[in-house]
Amino acid sequence: MIDMSPNVVLVVVVGVLVACGVYLLLERSLTRVLVGTVLLGNAVNLLVLVAGGAAGRPPITGLRPEGVTSDPLPQAMVLTAIVITLALTAFLLAMAYRSWQLHRHDEVQDDVEDRRIARLAAIDERAFTDTDTEAGGRTLAEEAAETHDETERGQP
């Protein structure tokens, strides 16, 4: 029988990698976001391999009993995740390079419209006037009841 308990050191390494990856993902610099993505991807890959169980014999049918062969599914999932992480890394590298070309830094700035809406929300004021609902004088509940009545009239 194969021991299915995970190695505690690997679980701690996964936790540290996830914590560092999430911390770096929350930064404004695209370079730090890139490193955080790589760390998080590696942490998830290691987690899948640790959760997959202990290593065993190659999973070739008929050579060994079923209990001593390794499960190939975690390895296939990690291989797929590596390819996806590589593509995401290439995309983030291209974004950081383009940001460096345009602005000479790779820091993501706040959007001007987001700042304006946050300022209006702080003083509890609308960002725009909705002329469709305010000009008619009817509430949303009244319009919904009228629409509901129209759909029921057409049915037998």
Image (tube, rainbow, N blue to C red):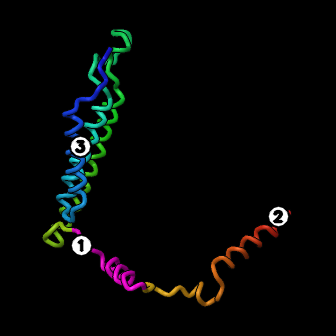
Q: Residue furthest right?
A: 156
- Magenta stretch bounds: 108-124
Whether the magenta-drawn stretch holds residue 31 is answered as no
Q: Locate residue 22 relative to residue 119 in the image: left or right.
A: left
Q: What's the CA distance linking mark 2 and mark 1?
A: 54 Å
Q: Residue furthest left?
A: 104
| Residue at 26% in and 55% down | 91
Q: Which mark is residue 15?
A: 3
Q: Nearer the viewer, residue 135 or 59?
A: 135
Report x, y in % for residue 132: 59, 85
Q: Nearer the viewer, residue 30 or 99?
A: 30
Q: What's the CA distance linking mark 3 and mark 1?
A: 30 Å
Vertical relation: 51 (above or below) 63: below
Mark 1, residues whose alpha carbon is within 10 Å: few (<14), some, or many (≥20)?
few
Q: Which mark is residue 109?
A: 1
Q: Main secondary structure of the magenta part?
A: helix
Q: Between disc 3 and disc 1, whose residue precedes?
A: 3
Under mark 3, the amino acid is: Gly
Q: Secondary structure at mark 1?
A: loop
Q: Which mark is residue 155?
A: 2
Q: Locate residue 53 relative to residue 31 in the image: left or right.
A: right
Q: Secondary structure at mark 2?
A: loop
Mark 2, residues whose alpha carbon is within 10 Å: few (<14), some, or many (≥20)?
few
In which quarter of the view is residue 15 placed? top left
Q: Locate residue 42 relative to residue 1 in the image: left or right.
A: left
Q: Nearer the viewer, residue 10 or 40?
A: 10
- Kindly indicate whether the residue at mark 1 contacts the one at mark 3 (C-beta within 8 angstroms): no
Quadrant containing the C terminus is bottom right
Q: What's the CA distance linking mark 3 and mark 2?
A: 59 Å
